[in-house]
Amino acid sequence: MGVITIPSEAALQQANVQFQLNINGQTRTLDLDPRTTLLDALREHLGLNGSKKGCDQGQCGACTVHVNGQRTLSCLSLAIAHQHDEIATIEGLAEGEELHPMQSAFMECDGFQCGYCTPGQIMSAIAMLEEAAQTIPSHATPVVSQPPSLDDLSLEEIRERMSGNICRCGAYPNIVEAIQYARRLRKGSR
């Protein structure tokens, strides 16, 4: 057996790479180990703690952010891989004091209990509605060549499209209600 050598802190610092990320419309410069996940860069180095570290294995959805408008599990993605991307986090949704319609819907419909999963649920729900608006089918779509429109999403479709986000409190009925409410707000009716 060989001897295991643990690199010094100075050696680890020398291995860092400087790069920039565009997060919530702001360019941020980071000097990090290139193996740093997007989630750790957001939480540990930029102070954006809305995205949560649940399972750290891409199973729970608590870390969901948007990368170029697509939902992304930030715990499975290296920060350095997103140098030229537009990253949106829960902190960037509100316009000043005005909440994003999905945030308002979650408040109106009580779509949370402990709140730990809520940022990931909201980010996923926003992207999910956009996917539906683009007529992207899901696994629950009966005829894949004829996906439902945003107006025709069934409860089964919504549940399937949100299945990557886990709520340990079991607030699923209210989460689905919040998504339906936000969909109606998007259309201009309640």
Image: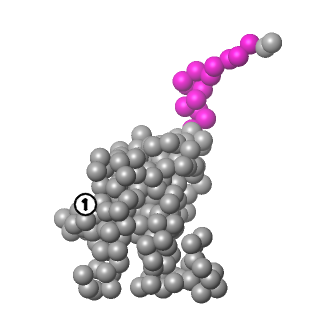
Q: State which region is magenta.
A: 3-17
User: Is residue 16 covered in magenta?
Assistant: yes
Q: Is residue 25 above or below residue 12?
A: below
User: Is residue 14 covered in magenta?
Assistant: yes
Is 154 displayed left or right of 108 in the figure?
right
Residue 71 visible: yes
The residue positioned 31% from the left and 68% from the top of the image is 178
Measuring from the top left, give residue 19's x and y in whole percent. Answer: 53, 50
Q: Which structural element holds mark 1? A: loop
Measuring from the top left, give residue 5's x and y in whole percent. Answer: 68, 17
- Disc 1 crowd, CA 10 A, few/some/many (<14, 14-19, 20+): some
Amino acid identity at mark 1:
Asp
Is 134 displayed left or right of 7 in the figure?
left
The color scheme shown is one colour
The residue positioned 57% from the left and 39% from the top of the image is 33
Residue sitting nearer the eye, 137 or 19: 137
Badge 1 is on which residue? 110
Q: Which picture quadrant has residue 1?
A: top right
Residue sitting nearer the eye, 6 or 181: 181
Q: Is residue 184 above or below residue 115?
A: below
The residue positioned 35% from the left and 78% from the top of the image is 183
